[in-house]
Structure formats: structure tokens, C-alpha cells
């Protein structure tokens, strides 16, 4: 059996043992707790800033509620693109292989996740924070065309950054039980997706030409920029009476927030560096992403 089939076979058996139906596992009717955060407070984009100091405790909780909804909205957007990529990739494959079957199994996971995130945004009583027009177009272009190293690297960046944040939130007792449960389910299932994408990315890099890799490095840098700068939609600050421009500026200058991005990005950055996928003209985007 090839390495590729071996990885997929293991992932299929792990999927059979550890998959969760959020409709059943989560008590969606349980009321939210009035004194729990929705994101660990030290991960809130304004934590420690003068703006944060001026907020009341209940406003701080409100802001984390909107930041959690913003991340979930970004998650649904990303997963919808990912599902299209996986289906497109599957179309060309032999359906009797474990590798192809795992791609579909991952689509099934992402279907449940996006339903779960949608329900969560609704339960949090927050708006759906959408990406801007440029990223919307970029997302549709990637969904329709991405393949090879840039496809799997973009997937990994989004999955691993979110994974670091959710792993921590799932274990934090100051966080709402609902958010902890959503995070726990997502972390368990995403661990498989990360293994699949990492193995596939390494294979695709070995198979790619130098020219191909030079272009892909640039697309990967844009994906990193999008992930690093897009988790918190600037409109979230309106929920506590701060203008989007003022909130975004304070977050960008906030050493705590910068450290959060760097910390959340470090694992995937190290992996992409090992594969020589960070560099070239995309470096300015990487630096602005905050993930380096
Ligand atoms: Fe997911
Ligand atoms: Fe995933």
C-alpha cells in the first residue's frame, strides 16, 4: 500500500470512531451564561488596550461574543470553499481508493461544521460577518481553480490557525460551555484534516516545478494575509460603541493581539518554512499577516 493510501486508510478508521453530530451532541436550547466569555479574554483583539480598559465587564463579554461570531462566519466561508476544492479534486480520482474516499469523508465533516457554525452565530444573536468584495472574489477564484501546493497550503493555514485558537478555548473555563463544546468537536475532527493536508502538501510540493512553486508562494502569502487580518471583522467593534476604524487600528497596534496571531500561526509557519513555501515577492504580505 502506498504512503498516500496508508494515511487515508488510517484517517478513515479514525473518522469512523470519532465523528460527532452537533445536532445531537450540543444542547442548543441551553441558555447562554451571562458571565462567561465567548473567546478567552486574553485572545480578544482589544485585550489590554486603553479601549479595553474603558469597557465594562459586560461590554467585554459582548465584544468576545461578536469576535466569536466573526471567526465562525469566516470559518463557514472558508469551509464552503474547501468543500468545493475537495469535490473538484475528488472528481478526477478513482473512487475505490482510500485517498478519494477520505476526501469525501472530509467534505461530510465540513458540512456538519458549517451547519454547526451557522447555528452558533444564530444562537449568539450576532450578524453574519461577511468577507469584503475583494476577498469574496478571491475566494470564488480559489474555489474554482486552486489545486496543488497553493490549494493545500491555503487550507492548512486556515485550519491550523483556527485549530490553535479553538484548542485553547475548548480548555478555558472562563469560556461559554457552548463555545467550548463547538471548539472541542471541531478540534477533534480538524486534527484529521490537518494530517491529510500536511501529507498531501508535502507530496504536491515534491511533484511541482520551480515555476509553479514561485507562483504558488505568492498565492499562499495572500492566503496567509487573509487569514491573519480577517479573523476579526472590524464591524464587531460597533457592538460596544467603538467605530470599526478605531477598533481595527487599536487591534493592529495591540501587542497582545500581535502575539496571539504569531502564536496561532507558529506551527503552520514552521511547516511551510520546512517545505520552502515562504519567501519571494509574497514576503511583504506574510509580514502584514501578523503570522510570522
Ligand atoms: Fe471544519
Ligand atoms: Fe477542516
Image: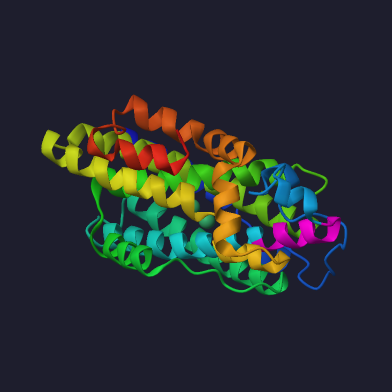
Q: Is residue 280 visible?
A: yes
Give the residue displayed 37% in from the left and 39% down from the top: 286
Is 270 situated left or right of 241 in this image?
Answer: left
Query: In the image, residue 87 lies at what x, y percent?
Result: 33, 63
Is 65 situated left or right of 114 in this image?
Answer: right
Give the residue displayed 68% in from the left and 41% down from the top: 168
- Furthest-top residue in view? 274
- Point out the image quarter for the C terminus: top left
The image quarter containing residue 277 is top left
Give the residue displayed 66% in from the left and 72% down from the top: 126
Nearer-the-camera pick, 168 or 18: 168
Query: In the image, residue 21 lies at what x, y percent?
Result: 64, 63
The image quarter containing residue 197 is top left
Query: In the image, residue 88 lies at what x, y percent?
Result: 28, 62
Image: magenta residue range = 56-66
Q: Is residue 9 visible?
A: no
- Point out the image quarter for the N terminus: top left
Asked if 230 appears above or below 170 in the picture, the reply is below
Is residue 191 highlighted in magenta? Answer: no
> How did the renderer colour the structure?
rainbow
Q: Main secondary structure of the magenta part?
A: helix
Amino acid at each position: 500500500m502506498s504512503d498516500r493510501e496508508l494515511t487515508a486508510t488510517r484517517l478513515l478508521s479514525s473518522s469512523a470512531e470519532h465523528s460527532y453530530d452537533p445536532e445531537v451532541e450540543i444542547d442548543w436550547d441551553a441558555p447562554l451564561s451571562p458571565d462567561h466569555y465567548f473567546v478567552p479574554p486574553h485572545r480578544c483583539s482589544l485585550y489590554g488596550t486603553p479601549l479595553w480598559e474603558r469597557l465594562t465587564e459586560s461590554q467585554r463579554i459582548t465584544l468576545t461574543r461578536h469576535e466569536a461570531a466573526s471567526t465562525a462566519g469566516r470559518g463557514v466561508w472558508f469551509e464552503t470553499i474547501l468543500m468545493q476544492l475537495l469535490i473538484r479534486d475528488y472528481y478526477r480520482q478513482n473512487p475505490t481508493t482510500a485517498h478519494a474516499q477520505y476526501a469525501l469523508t472530509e467534505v461530510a465533516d465540513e458540512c456538519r461544521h458549517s451547519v454547526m457554525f451557522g447555528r452558533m452565530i444564530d444562537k449568539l444573536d450576532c450578524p453574519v460577518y461577511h468577507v469584503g468584495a475583494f476577498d469574496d472574489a478571491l475566494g470564488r477564484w480559489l474555489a474554482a481553480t486552486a489545486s496543488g501546493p497553493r490549494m493545500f497550503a491555503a487550507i492548512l493555514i486556515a485550519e491550523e490557525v483556527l485549530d490553535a485558537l479553538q484548542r485553547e478555548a475548548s480548555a478555558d473555563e472562563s469560556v461559554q460551555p457552548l463555545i467550548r463544546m463547538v471548539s472541542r468537536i471541531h478540534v477533534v475532527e480538524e486534527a484529521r484534516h490537518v494530517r491529510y493536508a500536511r501529507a498531501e502538501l508535502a507530496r504536491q510540493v515534491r511533484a511541482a516545478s520551480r515555476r509553479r512553486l514561485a507562483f504558488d508562494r505568492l498565492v499562499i502569502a495572500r492566503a496567509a494575509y487573509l487569514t491573519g487580518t480577517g479573523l476579526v471583522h472590524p464591524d464587531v467593534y460597533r457592538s460596544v460603541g467603538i467605530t470599526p476604524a478605531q477598533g481595527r487600528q487599536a487591534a493592529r497596534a495591540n501587542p497582545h493581539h500581535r502575539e496571539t496571531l504569531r502564536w496561532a500561526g507558529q506551527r503552520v509557519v514552521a511547516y511551510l518554512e520546512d517545505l520552502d513555501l515562504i519567501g519571494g515577492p509574497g514576503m511583504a504580505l506574510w509580514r502584514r499577516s501578523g503570522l510570522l
